[in-house]
Amino acid sequence: MPRAGLSPEAVVRIAVDLVDAGGTTGFADLTLARVAAAAGVATPSLYKHVGSLAALRREVAVLAARDLRAALVDATLGRSGPEALRALAHGIRAYAHAQPGRYAAVQVAADPADPADAELAAAGAEVVGLMVAVLRGFALPDDRAVDAVRAVRAGVHGFVTLELGGGFRLPQDLDRSFAVLVDLLVAGVADLAAPAEASAARV
């Protein structure tokens, strides 16, 4: 039976529900046909509310990015320096485990040349901005801040992606391995923040 009062917001909500229910492949498996079936309408009827699958995926990605940022704000609130970075890393991992479909959606990169991606770009920038704020507690030089953000993102995302994809098959405790990774990231960011003379003296 068709849902009464279908709207653009309702279509996005249905899409998010499908992404959530689909686990690690929920975002990749999202189609207009699946959304239409969940809404109880024919697929062409969705075009009254959403322009395309790409547009719908973009809306889901925006919602997911904002959701992740809110979770990371809660995780890092009141913390600074290494403690904040540890909370950030564990917060990202916890979110990816709890919402793997949304976490995959967050990885959609906005096209800066496409006006249709402006909202997605802004949502992504808010997540990165939170990471920058966390790393600011290390007093990084301005020219190393981007390096630090990229290193943290790559390290945590790489671990989480391998973990969720079943890439770690050895029996050793994954929590311990993740803690080691976070320790390495904390030490690495602290090293980036150290004056060049101090870093050279340690070599």
Image (cartoon, rainbow, N blue to C red):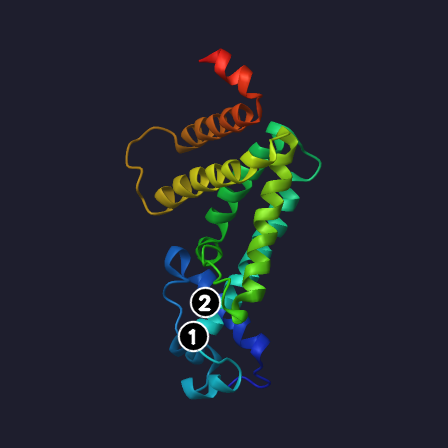
Tell whether 67 sits left or right of 106: right
> Which label sits in the foreground, 1 or 2?
1
Against 60, is 11 above or below?
Answer: below
- Most extreme residue toward the left is 169
- Most extreme residue toward the right is 78
- Numbered-mark total: 2
Image point (41%, 77%), residue name: 32
Q: Secondary structure at mark 1?
A: helix
Q: Are dots 1 and 2 in contact, CB under 8 Å?
A: no
Q: Position of residue 150 (x, y in %)?
A: 48, 41
Tell whether 90 sits left or right of 178: right
Classify the position of the C terminus by image quarter: top left
The residue to which callout 1 is attached is 53
Q: Position of residue 113 (x, y in %)?
A: 49, 65
Q: Mark 2 belongs to which amino acid?
A: Leu
**Front-most of residues 105 and 143:** 143
- Most extreme residue toward the top is 201
The residue to which callout 2 is attached is 18
Disc 1 to disc 2, C-alpha distance: 14 Å
Q: Earlier in the sequence, mark 1 or mark 2?
A: 2
Disc 1 packing (10 Å; few <14; some 14–19; many ≥20): some
Image point (46%, 47%), residue name: 97
